Amino acid sequence: MLPTDPYDIERIAGDLEQRIREEGWADSELVFNLTGGTKTMVLAAYRIAESRRAPFVYLQSEGRRSILYRYEFGDHGYRKARDEVLPALLTINDYIRAHVGRDPEQMRPKEDLGARFEAAIRDALQGCVDEVKQGVILGGALELDLVVRLGNQVGVIQAKTGEKAKKKEGLDQLNAACGRENLGTYTAKILTVNQRWDETLENLRELAGAWNITVIELPSFTPDSPSLSPEDQERLRREVRRVLGG
């Protein structure tokens, strides 16, 4: 890690140059990743890359794909050397650790209807996605019902039953979990409910749309029949894969 000023280009470039000298890195050993950080950090890193004729890369995560663009310098400035769609390179634990700085904790199993709904969703998604975890604690009071991964794309699923399925709580939880200070805005947000959202809940549907939250209705799961019908299982799998780019 190299702590530096996020906005002072001269300070950032100076800190980078000093670290390169201290480590004794040759220009041929350097690759600059210009994906993250502030715009001023990117400008400073690009300036050092250009002065040393070192290659640089940019990772595109938008569009539910991971594409790495590679650039190198030639006689007439930089040029794109190639781009490549990256295979799955991380796990859910890797993803959470990178964002919050620690491994996730596991919630103690519960036996209530909500936990059975989560388990039914987990079981339906097994084999449909690359990884699914139930009962994840990010820290403090922030608990995630399920986290799913398809390739390098990760999503959070909050599962609500009964009256809670008709409340704003699940939307708020997803917004908090996938904010910049937690898992980041590229994390997919999915709310699963065992109720129909009819016209009386149009305000919640509009809010979900404004917050880029996908709502999946799974009404076959009831207290008297706590399982998902084949139709609801297929709807769940199809929508989750769509959201994650599958």
Image: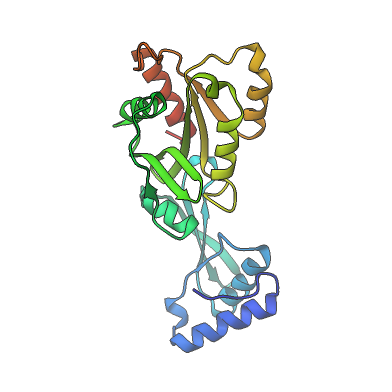
Q: Nearer the viewer, residue 141 or 131?
A: 141
Tally the marks.
0
**Based on the displayed image, in which of its 4 quarters is residue 17 positioned?**
bottom right
Position of residue 102 relative to residue 62, above or below, is below
Above or below, 71 against 8 in this view is above
In percent of width and height, residue 28 lies at 44, 78
Q: Residue furthest front?
A: 111
Looking at the image, residue 228 lies above or below residue 30: above
At horizontal 48% and vertical 88% (from top left) the residue drawn is 22
Depth order, front residue of 229/31 = 229
Q: Residue at x 59, y 79 (%)?
A: 51
Look at the image and tell me whether residue 87 can be seen.
Answer: no
Q: Position of residue 107 (x, y in %)?
A: 37, 43
Locate residue 238: give its quadrant.
top left
The quarter of the picture where the C terminus appears is top left
Using the image, determine if residue 113 lies above or below residue 156: above
Residue 213 occupies quadrant: top right
Query: Is residue 188 among the parts visible in the rendering?
Result: yes
Colour basis: rainbow
User: What residue appears at the point 30 percent right and 31 percent down from the top-left corner?
Assistant: 126
> Which residue is more in the foreground, 130 or 78?
130
**At 42% from the left edge and 27% from the top edge, which residue is drawn?**
114
224 sits left or right of 143 in the view: left
196 on left or right of 150: right
Residue 232, image x and y in percent? 40, 16
* Residue 7 coordinates in the image, percent (x, y): 70, 70
Q: Nearer the viewer, residue 106 or 66?
A: 106
